[in-house]
Amino acid sequence: MTGQVVEKSASSTAAAVEWGTLVAQIKTGDDAGMEQLYKMFSRGIRYYLCRQLGPQELDDKVHDTFLIVVNAIKRGDLREPERLMGFVRTVVRRQVAAYIEEAVHSRREQADLETGASVADRKQNPEQEAMIRQKNELMRSALEALSQRDRDILIRFYLKEQPQEQICREMSLTETQFRLLKSRAKAKFGEIGRKKLTSSGIFSVFMRAKAG
Amino acid sequence: MERARLFLTYMTQPHLDHPDDEAIERFAMNRCEHDEQEAIDTHIIGCPWCVDRLEKLQDEILDIKVGGTLFLRSQAARKRSWLKRWTIPSLSLAGLAALAAALVLLTSPHDVNLSAYRGSEVVTVPQWRPLHLHLNARDLDAGPVIVQIVDDRGMEIWKGRSTVAQEQVDTRAPAVRNPGEHFIRLEDGDGSVLREFAIEVKLFP
Ligand SMILES: [Zn+2]
């Protein structure tokens, strides 16, 4: 844990961006500007859309949203270039609302047609399901391998989502002890989990799946 | 949330300062207060590095949730088999107490906290139990709102009125009788969907 220190190490972020130049480049349709904009925002837009809408057709949604941002900038909707990040976020939020509405409508139409098979396409294939089950079982055994106190802290905080104050009270911990124990328990859990995944052979499969 | 305020005082330039690990964790777990949420929201849109941190953290949290759920389930199963072995079946008082407890459980509302939108997180909800819904209404205007529960084909099961207050909608809803995927929607007076949450209804969640 870094405590109260703000991280300053990332390189490819907004720190080095000259907002006015970037916006001007995009307005003129300059390729370098477009590329920089895409490099900066595509991961964030993807993350945001996925968090709100799930992974379905994510590439298309990211692409559409990016085009909307570019067109809005070209139209001059962004008056203060230094507000670009907030501007992008507003566009993405509007897109999320639009996608939700669209999904609701299409489900209504589906219901009218009595096809109603909307859940089927989310299912995994049997091999993937077996692998996920195996991984889940390993996570259970990793948690079981922790001390009771470490396990209790992780389950209370992350699974039961109990407030920190409640956990401290019920486990007789100070706030500092709690933070330290939680961070150590999480690290231990991660370490044991990784070892178990590696020795089971499914770690590499998951990494490949992620990369793909 | 002393730390949340603290974070905001030093995150003066959301486009330059990366949130620290604890702030990132609050964000991943939807535990940020409004201002902090706004600042981090804006930051991550333009910071691939923090998106990496968030995704890694969310994977870790998911592993803990999954492992924890299975662990608690296995503990409960062990306890049940132990009880079976040692309890006398004809303990009528204990039986009655269990029945009474089951009845109380079935009639008492089950708290459902929904913070993510459709697709990113599905919360499991017990069948046949009245629900007490706590729905995240961040960014929605305060005021009246319609809450609707529909099945996976979009068929309405229940509709009620509530209000958005302090970025949340709290309302009680009747028990859902059928298992499977359902959606809870917030709509405005014109019937436009403002937000949608997914739930999975199960007999034994
Ligand atoms: Zn960052």
Image (cartoon, grey):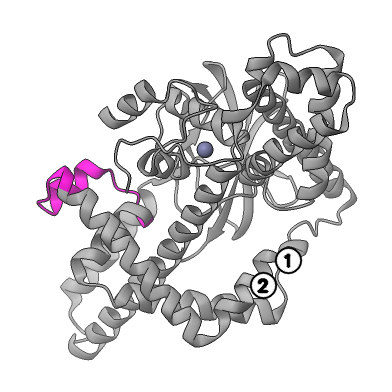
Expressed as whole percent of the image width and height from the top left, the position of residue B195 reads 63, 33
Disc 2 residue: CB within 8 Å of ligand 1: no
Q: Chain of mark 2?
A: A
Image-quadrant location for residue B141: top right
Total residue callouts: 2
Q: Nearer the viewer, residue A190 or A161?
A: A190
> What residue occupies the far bottom of the structure in this picture?
B85
**Tag 2: residue type?**
Arg
Residue A94, relative to residue A83: is it above or below? below
- The answer to whether A13 appears left or right of A66 in the picture is left
- Residue B86 shown left or right of residue B177 in the figure: left
Q: Magenta span has A175?
A: yes
10 Å neighbourhood of mark 1: few (<14), some, or many (≥20)?
A: few
Q: Is residue B125 at all visible to an observer of this figure?
A: no
Q: CA distance from mark 1 to mark 2?
A: 6 Å
Judging by the rendered image, the residue that carries numbered circle 1 is: A212
Q: Residue at x 45, y 39 (%)?
A: B27
| Residue drawn at x 83%, y 23% as measured from the top left | A26
Dot 1 and dot 2 residues touching (CB under 8 Å)? yes
Q: Position of residue B171 (x, y in %)?
A: 46, 32
Give the answer, above or below, for where B111 lies relative to A197: above
Neighbour tally class for label 2: few under 14, some 14-19, many 20 plus, Cα within 10 Å? few
Q: Position of residue A156 (x, y in %)?
A: 29, 56
Type of amino acid under label 1:
Gly
The mark found on residue A208 in the picture is 2
Q: Quadrant of the N terminus of chain B?
A: top left
Question: Pointer 1 indicates a residue of which chain?
Answer: A
Magenta-tinted stretch: A159-176
Quarter of the rendering containing residue B90:
bottom left
